[in-house]
Amino acid sequence: MTEQGRPDDWVARFMAMHVDRMAAELSPEVTSRPTWGMLTAPEVVDFVTNLAPPPSKEPLVHTETRPFGRLFVAASHIPTMNMRRFRKKLLGDGYLTMLEPIKHTSGFAAGTADLAHWMVFDDGKGSYGVNLSYLPAAREAKPLLPLELLSSKEKRQVGLIIR
């Protein structure tokens, strides 16, 4: 989802719209999880909205993490609106490859909390967008992954992918 303007003006609305749209497409095994309802809680929205862009062009992707009870949130500022460019030029081996170091260096404990990764895209010219990954701790619940950011290898590894 994308829009022009200031992030404060649209981020909460777009986060809610994104979650609502995904809820309509996902199974109840995902959307009935208590943490699903926390994805747009005021404290989570504040955390994502107040994510500061990196102080310089390096690193290209700036990520901050924070636990919210049983929901662990990673929020990334990504300096482009071009998903293809981001995946090919900045992700290298794919989205999951980028996510692994975030999980391992942030204090996230797999299997104990659901992981939400909000990505805020910003082209530096006033256009912004949001995307969400949601990885439930329960293995039987299918993850929500950004298909357009997965490498071909990751798509094969994941198998069933929900976009």
Image (cartoon, rainbow, N blue to C red):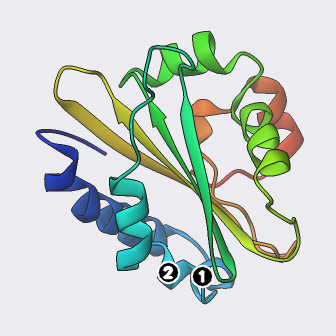
Q: To which residue does mark 2 refer?
A: 38
Q: Nearer the viewer, residue 34 or 9?
A: 9
Q: Residue at x 47, y 74 (%)?
A: 23
Instruction: Tell me if label 2 and label 1 are in contact, CB under 8 Å.
Output: yes
Q: Is residue 40 visible?
A: no
SS for dot 1: loop
Residue 61's image quarter? top right
Identify the disc placed on residue 35. 1
Locate residue 105, reporting x and y percent: 81, 46
Please state if 116 lies on the left or on the right of 21 as rendered. Answer: right
Q: Amino acid at mark 1?
A: Thr
From this view, report whether residue 77 is shown above or below residue 12: above
Q: Nearer the viewer, residue 23 or 37?
A: 37
Q: Amino acid at mark 2?
A: Met
Count neighbours of disc 2 (C-alpha within 10 A) and say few if under 14, some if 14 to 19, many if 20 or more: some
Q: Residue at x 61, y 40 (%)?
A: 147
Locate residue 145, reporting x and y percent: 64, 50
Residue 44's image quarter? bottom left
SS for dot 2: helix
Q: Residue at x 75, y 52 (%)?
A: 106
Locate residue 99, reporting x and y percent: 73, 41
